[in-house]
């Protein structure tokens, strides 16, 4: 009983400390313009549009010394009144004696603490308020008046985590509300858990990224190859040692180990996960176990007929079984992908923004995954909600042989994290190399991606 009480106290203490960390990071350190906004309602928020079009930017300082710029910017149909805190940017000046870098004051529209009122240029009516609180300007909350009611949205990298949620305060109350007020009013109606970034929880992720980067120069891409449970170079398709043909007599021989790694895309993912598993078990994962089917088709269906000749779910089976092996080793219990909680199958977004229009979002599709457009926002939220996890992925796309058929072929691994300032980033690896997130997203069109979670580890020792 004493042990249980001690454990409970430790857990309670840890949970109690998470809230102050977030409150200090987001609510305590965020520049709040409520004092400034209370002074400029008549001169900016409700002033005639014709007056705003003539106004020059103005600087205001609050009681704590924070400086904000208030300015108006024109759009095609709207005018934006921007209240933005002072920040600094490094600017390099070139002159005869060389270059000089200086910090220059900047008032960015999407900086943390910025507040933007959008008004219709023709009627002057308020259309919405956007509130920026995140290091990434693509993460913000938005409020709009509909009759006498106020509705709120939470937008994460172009995706709606919440849309048209009723907020029980008049719209004009938001003109002078603090961010603390907004957080308190919406803590149960907006999914703050998706954006409550707490830096400092990603040490193991960063360690693994660094080790993989150091190993990449010694990796050669080679289709169909991986290292088996004994660390020997094997053909995945044959589940036999990799051999070369002697040109003189046609005999097969196993090439000598030259100190480099030869890996296919699937073999590369296996190599990473084996770097967590082998230090614990003394062995890598077995090829035959990773090839076990995780999707079953009616033998008379189209996919059933196709799969009798070649697996159309190879990459999905591979990453699911790898993730299940990882959780089994970590917990000391035997899990499959079905009961190990390794599939990422949560529905986070209700809709997204495409070409300026709101489009319904399908979310997770069983045995298929998510539309590619979801990926970046998904990884952002997963990094917030599951710090310290990385994600191995299988891509479902049109077959190169028959375009009207879909197959799981390619694989990748994602290491999402937030740096010490709270800014999101994600390392992406595939086929034995690192690619930028944006370059990776450009590789696929009309494709789906299935994510499986694996816990990162400081005990990461890949071959």
Image (cartoon, rainbow, N blue to C red):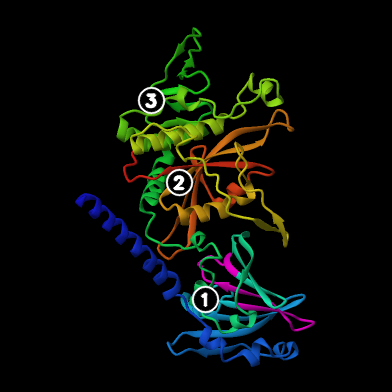
The boundaries of the magenta stretch are 116-141
Residue 72 image point, x, y percent: 66, 83
Please tell me which residue is depicted at 35% across the width and 35% down the height of the picture. Answer: 329
Q: Residues within 10 Å of mark 2 (few under 14, many from 20)?
A: many
Find numbered disc 1 in the image and state the secondary structure of the residue it sits on. Answer: loop
- Residue at the disc numbered 1: 113
The reply, left or right, for residue 53 in relation to residue 180 is right
Tag 3 near tag 2, CB within 8 Å: no
The residue positioned farthest toward the top in the image shown: 249
User: Earlier along the polypeptide chain: callout 3 or callout 1?
Assistant: 1
Question: Residue 85's x, y, as percent?
Answer: 52, 80
Horizontal relation, residue 205 to residue 370: left or right? left
Residue at horizontal 51%, vertical 29%?
A: 222
| Mark drawn on residue 390 | 2
Q: Earlier in the sequence, mark 1 or mark 2?
A: 1
**Residue 115 pos. (x, y %):** 58, 78
Q: Which residue is mark 3?
A: 229
Question: Residue at the left extreme?
Answer: 2
Residue 378 showing in the rendered view: yes
> Hey, which quadrant is residue 396 in on the image?
top right
Of tags 3 and 1, the one toward the viewer is 1
63 is higher (above) or lower (below) than 191: below
Q: Quadrant of residue 461?
A: top left
Crowd rating for badge 1 (residues with CA inside 10 Å; few <14, some 14–19, many 20+): many
- Residue 117 belongs to the span the image colors magenta: yes
Q: CA distance from mark 1 to mark 2?
A: 30 Å
Residue situated in front as seen by the camera: 85 or 384: 384
Residue 210, compared with residue 168, is above or below; it is above
* Label 3 to label 2: alpha-carbon separation: 22 Å
List the single residue furthest toward the right: 122
């Amino acid at each position: 009983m004493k042990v249980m009480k001690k454990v409970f106290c430790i857990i309670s203490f840890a949970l109690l400390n998470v809230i102050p960390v977030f409150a200090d990071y987001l609510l305590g350190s965020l520049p709040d313009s409520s004092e400034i906004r209370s002074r400029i309602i008549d001169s900016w928020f409700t002033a005639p549009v014709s007056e705003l079009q003539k106004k020059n930017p103005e600087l205001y300082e609050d009681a704590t010394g924070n400086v904000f710029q208030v300015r108006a910017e024109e759009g095609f149909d709207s005018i934006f009144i921007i209240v933005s805190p002072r920040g600094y940017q490094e600017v390099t000046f070139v002159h005869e004696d060389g270059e000089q870098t200086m910090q220059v004051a900047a008032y960015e529209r999407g900086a943390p603490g910025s507040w933007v009122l959008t008004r219709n240029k023709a009627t002057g009516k308020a259309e919405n308020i956007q509130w920026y609180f995140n290091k990434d300007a693509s993460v913000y909350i938005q409020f709009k008046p509909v009759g006498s009611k106020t509705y709120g949205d939470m937008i994460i990298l172009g995706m709606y985590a919440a849309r048209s949620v009723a907020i029980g305060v008049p719209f004009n109350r938001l003109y002078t509300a603090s961010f603390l007020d907004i957080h308190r009013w919406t803590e149960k109606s907006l999914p703050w858990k998706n954006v409550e970034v707490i830096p400092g929880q990603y040490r193991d992720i960063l360690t693994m990224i660094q080790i993989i980067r150091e190993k990449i120069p010694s990796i050669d891409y080679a289709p169909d190859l991986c290292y088996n449970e004994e660390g020997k170079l094997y053909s995945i398709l044959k589940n036999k040692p990799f051999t070369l043909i002697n040109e003189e007599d046609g005999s097969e021989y196993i090439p000598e180990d030259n100190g480099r790694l030869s890996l296919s895309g699937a073999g590369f993912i296996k190599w990473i996960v084996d770097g967590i598993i082998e230090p614990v078990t003394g062995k890598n994962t077995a090829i035959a176990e990773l090839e076990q089917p995780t999707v079953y088709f009616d033998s008379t269906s189209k996919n059933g007929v196709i799969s009798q000749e070649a697996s159309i779910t190879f990459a999905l089976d591979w990453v699911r079984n790898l993730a299940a092996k990882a959780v089994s080793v970590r917990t000391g219990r035997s899990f499959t992908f079905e009961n190990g909680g390794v599939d990422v199958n949560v529905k986070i977004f209700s809709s997204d923004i495409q070409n300026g229009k709101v489009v319904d979002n399908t979310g997770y599709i069983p045995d298929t995954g998510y539309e590619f457009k979801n990926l970046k926002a998904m990884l952002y939220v997963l990094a917030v909600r599951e710090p310290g996890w990385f994600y191995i992925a299988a891509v479902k796309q049109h077959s190169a042989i028959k375009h009207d058929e879909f197959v799981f072929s390619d694989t990748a691994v994602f290491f999402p994290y937030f740096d010490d300032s709270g800014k999101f980033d994600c390392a992406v690896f595939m086929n034995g190399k690192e690619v930028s997130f944006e370059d990776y997203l450009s590789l696929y069109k009309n494709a789906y991606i299935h994510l499986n979670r694996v816990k990162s580890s400081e005990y990461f020792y890949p071959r």
